[in-house]
Image: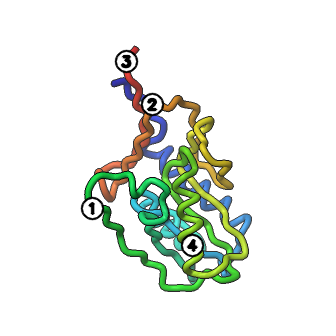
Amino acid sequence: MQKRTLLDGKKFQITIKRLCHQLIENHIDFANTVLIGIQPRGIYFADRVHQELSNILVDKPIQKGHLDITFFRDDFRRKDGLVTGSSNTIDFIIEGKKVILIDDVLWTGRTIRAAMDALLAYGRPEKVELMVLIDRRFSRHLPIEPNYIGKQVDCVDSQKVKVSWKEQEGEDKVILLSEKQ
């Protein structure tokens, strides 16, 4: 396997800060905006974005939740064995609010479609936007495009993008894995 580092260290942190400033430009005080991290891996990104926004917008509460999409996926019945979901941590209604869905990697678009279906249990949002750390272009199965992108990567289906989070793997890093030719 060949590895190519796409983001790490300072570039990783700068990317998150840049995305937060883009959010502030569009949502100003977040009075009517909520952040929703898609489980399992988008929650680390959502937590980081929330922390950074809270540091910038001191004394302005920003609502954040974690959304489990397990039973909204179109492939959950295809898995062998018992499928178990995680718990949602959304203690607010999204009716009439602007929702920013947050995930680490956008690939086929199926995860985002499932997340939009799962969101409806919490109300009808005024608007839904998508933020991703990595956008794997040219791999969509569904017509879904992000509003906020950390980094775009042109790669083929045989390549894999792996995001490591300090909270989970001990370091912040994004690598592209390719089979040796």
Which mark, by number, is residue 119?
A: 4
Instruction: Give the residue at the far top of this rendering.
Output: 181
Which mark, by number, is residue 159?
A: 2
Please, what is the three-letter code of the amino acid marked with disc 1?
A: Leu
Residue 125 drawn at (x, y percent): 67, 76
- Separation (CA) of disc 2 from disc 3: 11 Å
**Mark closer to the observer (2, 4):** 4
Residue carrying label 1: 82
Q: Quadrant of residue 153?
A: top right
- Separation (CA) of disc 2 from disc 4: 30 Å
Residue 10 drawn at (x, y percent): 47, 46
Q: Is residue 67 above or below residue 3?
A: below
**Who comes first in sequence, dot 4 or dot 3?**
4
Label 4 SS: helix
> Answer yes or no: do the residues labelled 1 and 2 have beta carbons within 8 Å?
no
Q: Quadrant of residue 179?
A: top left
- Label 3 crowd (10 A; few <14 / some 14-19 / many >=20): few
Please, what is the three-letter code of the amino acid marked with disc 3?
A: Lys
How many labels were placed on the picture? 4
